[in-house]
Amino acid sequence: MDENEGTDADLLTRLASGDQTALSIVFDRHAAAVTRYAWAIAPSRMDVEEIVQDTFVTVWRKAGEITIAETSLLPWLLVTCRYLALNVMRKAARNHADELDENIAGGSNAVREHHDAEATSEDLRWVLDEIERLDPIDRRVCELCLVEGLPYAEAAQQLGISVGAVKQRVSRSRARLKKAVTLDEV
């Protein structure tokens, strides 16, 4: 550490007053450690880059509110990095769509055996029966989003509920349907 650059506590004070040079010094001093930590918990390079960037943007925005216990800002940066990584992973899990089984989705073969067609038809009937057992609003959300393929925003507008409520209902319904399928197969 160059004595002219100052301690992390000094840099934090400079950051709070809007000193961009202080941010550059903090970044140069701690980016490698934050990046290594992000690599340990994030699933992809793109996520690592986003997490590291968001960590340093957060220290820039919150510099006036940060209190460091020791002389180093690194523990605060690593905790922030961890929380941002968990947020990225939760977001990815929410947005991850379950892929349909090849038998249900239809596969690429043009010619199918009669037995496979009957089995697929029975599977689809079973899924539709399970959807019928859902609460009316959940059933309508499933029909709009999962069966008709409407975007969440359009379904929310049609139903007069928020996009977040639609996402939550789709997620909950998928989990219920998946649980029912799993129990049925056992």
Image (cartoon, rainbow, N blue to C red):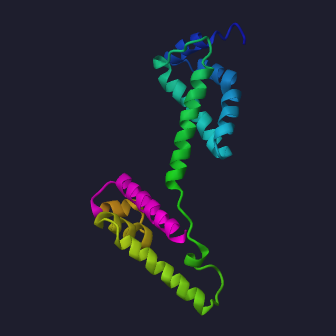
Residue beneath the point at 51% across and 48% down? 91
> Would you say the magenta stretch is mainly helix, strand or loop?
helix
Q: In screen coordinates, is 107 left or right of 97?
A: right
Residues drawn in magenta = 158-186
**Of residues 167 and 182, which is closer to you in this image?**
182
Residue 171, compared with residue 40, is above or below; it is below
**Of residues 79 and 63, which is closer to you in this image?**
79
Q: Position of residue 29 (x, y in %)?
A: 69, 21
Residue beneath the point at 52% across and 41% down? 87
Q: In screen coordinates, is 17 left or right of 77?
A: left
Tally the numbered discs: 0
**Quadrant of image for the N terminus:** top right
> Is 12 part of what is drawn in magenta?
no
Q: In screen coordinates, is 113 left or right of 87?
A: right
**Quadrant of image for the C terminus:** bottom right
Q: Quadrant of residue 82?
A: top right
Q: Most extreme residue toward the front, as rendered?
A: 186
Residue 106, compared with residue 163, is above or below; it is below
Q: Position of residue 106 (x, y in %)?
A: 58, 80
Q: Position of residue 164 (x, y in %)?
A: 38, 52
Q: Position of residue 93 (x, y in %)?
A: 53, 51
Residue beneath the point at 39% across and 67% down? 142
Q: Most extreme residue toward the top, as rendered?
A: 3
Q: Most extreme residue toward the left, as rendered?
A: 160
Residue beneath the point at 57% across and 66% down? 99
> Is 172 part of what is drawn in magenta?
yes
Q: Quadrant of residue 79?
A: top right
**Of residues 166 and 151, which is closer to you in this image?**
166
